[in-house]
Image: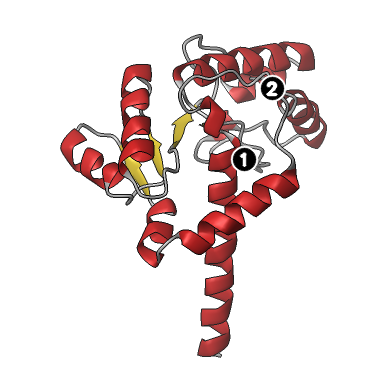
Amino acid sequence: MRKKTRICTKALAQKLLVCAVAVTLAIAPLAFGQSSSGPRPDDRVVRERVDALLKQMTLEEKIGQLSQLFDFGEVKKIDEAVAGGHAGSLLFVTDPAEINRFQHLAVDKTRVHIPLIFGYDVIHGFRTIFPVPIAMAASWDPATVTTAQSIAAKEARAVGIGWAFARCWTLRATPLGAHCGRGGRRSLSRLGHRRGASSRIPG
């Protein structure tokens, strides 16, 4: 039983690593503010690049890609972790100059030159703030929801954020649940309308 669990855990870690590296390589042209208007890379080509890169990576480098750090002011420690290949993504960095600096550390200082992924809570807007998701769902206006989320996506992408945590689609039996404002309430039809609108987000 333990052996089977270890095998399952190893397989899951491998899949997570492949996904992390694939996403990073897919957004690599955007890492330093390059245009994303070019043709999207073929899935097969990306997978081949990922497989080739994984074969070159040490176990420590793979673990580093699965590690995520928070930027809460301890810049020196984060700099060392990024330059040492001990981080694959950073959260809560919104200054484009800092994002660019971290990207140069990741790409220029590490052996495998993999860019970082930057994540942030873009729940109901980034620079421009919109009503919370539960309020947007109450509008029954998919076009407005799409417009709001598109603006948020473009604003976040403009500073270098490529991974937005947003639009929780949980159904709640009671309005007293934690983070109830992030969801579309307990109506399946309302949730479906809003989910469809928010899923078509450019940027």
Q: Is residue 10 left or right of residue 116?
A: right
Question: Taking 67 as reference, is 143 above or below it?
Answer: above
Find residue 135 and report its image quarter: top right
Q: How many residues crowd mark 1 within 10 Å: few (<14), some (14–19), many (20+)? A: few
Type of residue at label 1? Thr
Tell me if residue 114 can be seen: yes
x%, y% of residue 113?
A: 41, 43
Query: What residue is at 35 percent from the left and 62 percent from the top?
Result: 60
Q: Residue at x 33, y 44 (%)?
A: 69
Q: Earlier in the sequence, mark 2 or mark 1?
A: 2
> For the residues marked 2 and 1, what is the alpha-carbon distance in whole angstroms?
46 Å
Figure quadrant of the N terminus: bottom right
* Res 165 visible: no
126 horizontally vs 93: left or right: right
Foreground tag (2 vs 1): 2
Q: Tell me if residue 157 comes above or below residue 67 in the rendering.
A: above
* Secondary structure at numbered mark 1: loop
Q: Nearer the viewer, residue 140 or 106?
A: 106
Q: Please give the label number shown on residue 174.
A: 1
Relative to the observer, which residue lies in front, 144 or 18? Answer: 18
**Marks 2 and 1 in Cβ contact (< 8 Å):** no
Residue extending furthest toward the right:
189
